[in-house]
Amino acid sequence: MAHELVAEVWRGEFLESVHHGSVIALDATGREVLAVGRPHDTTYPRSSNKPVQALAMLRQGLDLSGELLALACASHSGEDFHVDGVRRVLDAHGLTEADLQCTPDLPIGEDSLKAHLAAGRSKAPIYMNCSGKHAAMLATCVVNGWSTHDYLDPAHPLQRAIRATLEDLAGERIGAEGVDGCGAPLLGISLAGLARAFGALARATAGPERRIADAMNRHPEWVGGTNRDVTKLMRAIPGAVAKDGAEGVYAIGLPTGEAVACKIADGSSRARAVVLVAALRRLGVDAPDELATFPVLGHGRVVGAVRPSPALVV
């Protein structure tokens, strides 16, 4: 893919490194306001696809709302309230932790990980950041009378419904297929399609799309974690629907219908919020200054920053 320069890493007054990537910003009519790199090429949305996966589950009869629906869209930090929420979803549908088929893992939140290890706990599926999504997938199977032992099979009715929903919201066909880090099927679309999907969720005024948008924006700490940038982003922009993803992916939709999606080519997470905020500002959105740069540290103090490339700056 022919990515372009999207972020610069400055240590003091010295340009130390750069990040290439692709980014697209759409206005409320779907018109491209900004297109850098190859935003129409297929890429894997990774966890940025979770709100669309959750939408497919609601369309199939899953009855979650509020913080538990936000958790179904989450890459959670593994804080106690996240883990308790996963158990609540499982318990309400006659399921147990043994039914989860996501990869055994440790919490990804720094404080949660420290507390987890200090308590002598080890890896388990419920602590994996995708366990909320997997609990919701299992619950959807129970609601529909579908088998639960093979819910990750691409041919399973659940996964077929997710595929159809993603193609519906993205407005394009799936361009690649693989396996995500959690074991779920992974479906590739373009960044343009991902932006269209997030715009559709955020601007919806009724139906399951509106339920997804309300749950995520009203309970952002359940989508990420207490100090995560995705949480801060949704707190700062009323009505926004945002989701980070592995390998440098990020997407956001606004209640007015505008949307942004980006990918950092080297998979780094440090530049993705910086690029996303720069693209939002190209749309005229008052995005938070806190996320407009990413700190570069030297001996434990800030000595520089990751900044958007000049091509992205308003």
Image (tube, rainbow, N blue to C red):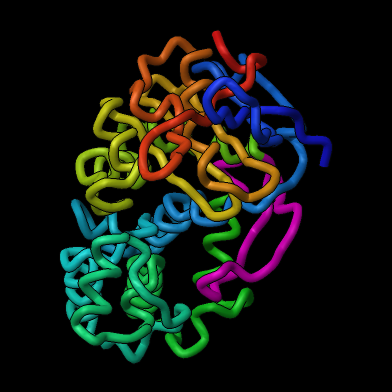
Residue 20 position by quadrant: top right
Q: Is residue 248 above or below residue 163?
A: above
Where is residue 33? Give x, y as percent. 61, 14
Residue 169 position by quadrant: top right
Where is residue 258? Give x, y as percent. 48, 22
Q: Is residue 114 above or below residue 281?
A: below
Point 31% across, 60% down: residue: 110
Q: Is residue 187 magenta?
A: yes
Q: Quadrant of the N terminus?
A: top right
Point 44% across, 31% down: residue: 303
Which residues fall within the magenta stretch? Answer: 167-190
Is residue 140 something that shows in the picture? no
Q: Is residue 80 above or below residue 46?
A: below
Specify whether 302 is left or right of 47. left
Q: Number of marks in the image? A: 0
Q: Is residue 70 above or below residue 35?
A: below
Q: Residue furthest front?
A: 299
Q: Quadrant of the C terminus?
A: top right
Q: Nearer the viewer, residue 211 or 33?
A: 33
Point 40% across, 57% down: residue: 54
